[in-house]
Image: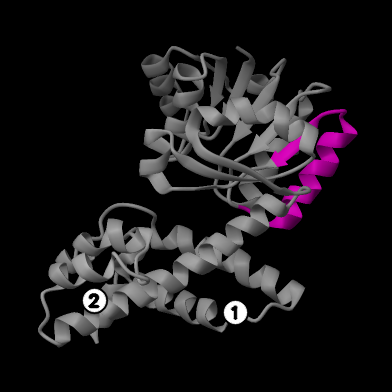
Amino acid sequence: MAKVAFIGLGVMGYPMAGHLRVKGGHDLTVYNRTAAKAEKWAGQFGGNTATTPAQATDGADFVFCCVGNDDDLRSVTTGKDGAFETLKAGAIFIDNTTASADVARELDTAATARGAHFIDAPVSGGQAGAENGVLTVMCGGKPDIFERARPVIDAYARMVGLMGPAGSGQLTKMVNQICIAGLVQGLAEGIHFGKKAGLDIEAVIDVISKGAAGSWQMENRHKTMNAGKYDFGFAVDWMRKDLDIVLSEARHNGASLPVTALVDQFYAEVQTLGGKRWDTSSLLARLEKQ
């Protein structure tokens, strides 16, 4: 058991913190911008609450964070009353936010200056993965620090991997989002084509999912896509935020991502259809409106 803090109780952070408390058995203090949600979490899982990130972090051995974007991350770490004000020497700050590699490197430097450690650890698996404690966690940091943190991270993960130095976890998450964007667009076009051709989509997927076309997206999203149901899952707004990070990094490193850029624009069209909070599989809705 360790003394742990968790900052950010959104749809991902809330259950992740719960797993750290229940499965990990840790002494846990949580902070959330909306205090009522922190109180609700504490009532459900029996942990403690804090009024600022700095208060939550004070004395913690491990500090987890899962917020919205780079600006939110800076606010709760190096901003006023941020976690880094009280981050003790030897503590490990584990950031589960999907953010830029630049901010990961920035916070690694800031943590090191305090005698503490930083791991960027974005996750994949969505809300269901967080609730079931089976997320994939992509980490960037020092090997010895990763080995210290891994048993704690395991409370909400199915797969935890060290991808390289600080920033490497975020870069790996970018690869993940690039692959998902192309897969979902391909699945949307396949289902759209199948419908236009008069095929039984369930029968088609039952066959092709067992071959080379099979994917997690196909197995888990084809039924809801075929039914036109999108009011759940990983929101289009969030995917566009992630793809903006991807495309910005590509401009920096010279990578050519024509399909990713195109799918990002398709998601922009879904937003105009009212789908800002629809699941990312709603790319099919765009095709069916044409």
277 vs 34, nearest the viewer = 277
Residue at x 32% of width, y 65% of height: 281
Q: Quadrant of the C terminus?
A: bottom left
Compare marks 1 and 2 and give the one earlier in the sequence. Answer: 2
Q: From which residue to which does the magenta span run?
A: 99-119
Which residue corresponds to the image point at 51% horizontal and 81% vertical from the top-left? 259
In the rendering, at what x and y percent does residue 98 appear? 58, 51
Q: Which mark is residue 191?
A: 2
- Give the quadrant of the N terminus: top right
From the viewer's side, name the closer residue of 45 and 40: 45
Chief secondary structure of the magenta portion: helix
Residue 109 falls within the magenta-colored stretch: yes
Q: Is residue 212 left or right of residue 75?
A: left
The amino acid marked with disc number 1 is Leu
- Of residues 188 and 68, the one drawn nearer to the viewer in this rendering: 188
Secondary structure under badge 1?
Answer: loop
The span from disc 1 to disc 2 (Cα, nearest Å) is 24 Å
In this rendering, the count of numbered labels is 2
* Res. 83 visible in picture: no
Residue 67 badge: none
Secondary structure beneath dot 2 equals helix
Residue flagged by tag 2: what amino acid is it?
Ile
Residue 101 appears in which quarter of the rendering? Answer: bottom right
Crowding around mark 1 (Cα neighbors within 10 Å: few <14, some 14 to 19, many 20+) is: few
* Label number found at residue 257: 1
Q: Is residue 138 visible?
A: yes
The answer to if 219 sits in the magenta stretch is: no
Up the image or down, 109 lies above or below 53; here it is below
Badge 2 crowding class, 10 Å Cα cut-off, few under 14, some 14 to 19, many 20 or more, is many
Q: Nearer the viewer, mark 1 or mark 2?
A: 2
